[in-house]
Amino acid sequence: MSNLLKYDVIYILDPNATSEDAAAVATKVEQITADAKGTILKKDDWGKRRLAYLVQKHREGHYIFYHLSLSTDAVAEIQRNLRLMEKVIKFSIVKDTISHLKAKVKPARVKTSTGTEGSASRPGYSRPTNPSTIRSAAPSAPAPVAPAPAAPASEAQNSPA
């Protein structure tokens, strides 16, 4: 027996499909999983939802989700069967590589000393140690505007009088 891997299988049924059609597709997926000695970890019926774009001239679809643990040969068989079924308008089978990973916890940062190490990395900067000494920047008055320069005297003499 080969290694069993986890897969997410999502297929979208024709919105006009009857409940018997949906049951037939689900039965086929479950039968292939059982024949391959796999297990169904989760089955979710997401219902009718609007599609992001037209798929085979349909604006809506009936979504079904499976989380399976099975061999790669069984995945190929499920894919072949979903491709042949007329009521399935779209499907996706993705290998689940994240569910078995644990979240990595970063160690807490520990302050090494209370000296002025920060000033060594950024010259000219010293961080105030007492929060009451921090002053907010007060808005400054706008700079005075210099008057425009007067027209040169030579232009005044050349003008016709």
Image (cartoon, rainbow, N blue to C red):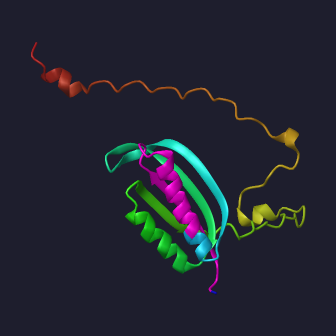
147 w.r.t. 67: above or below:
above
**Residue 77 in the image, given as x and y percentages of width and height:** 48, 74
Farthest-out residue, left:
160
**On the rendered image, what quadrant is the N terminus found in?**
bottom right
Along the viewing direction, whichever of 62 and 160 lies nearer the viewer: 62
Q: In this view, does 155 lie to the left or right of 103?
A: left
Where 152 sits versus 31, above or below? Answer: above
- The answer to whether residue 101 is left or right of residue 44 is right
Where residue 152 appears, as percent x and y from the top left, is 25, 27
Q: Please state which of residues 16 and 115 is positioned toward the viewer in this rendering.
A: 16
| Residue at left offset 44%, top offset 64% | 82
Indicate yes or no whether the magenta region holds residue 155.
no
Write the residue at 27% across / 25% down: 151
Start and end of the magenta stretch? 2-31
Q: Which residue is drawn at 57% across and 68% down?
A: 31
Instruction: Between residue 62 and residue 18, name the one nearer to us.
Output: 18
> Closer to the camera, 3 or 101?
3
**Which residue is painted at 46% across and 45% down in the image?**
18
Q: Where is residue 147 in the image (x, y as percent from the top left)?
A: 41, 24
- The question of residue 30 being in magenta is answered with yes
- Tell me: 154 left or right of 133: left
Residue 85 versus residue 142 in the image, above or below: below
Q: Tell me where residue 94 appears, x and y as whole percent.
A: 53, 67
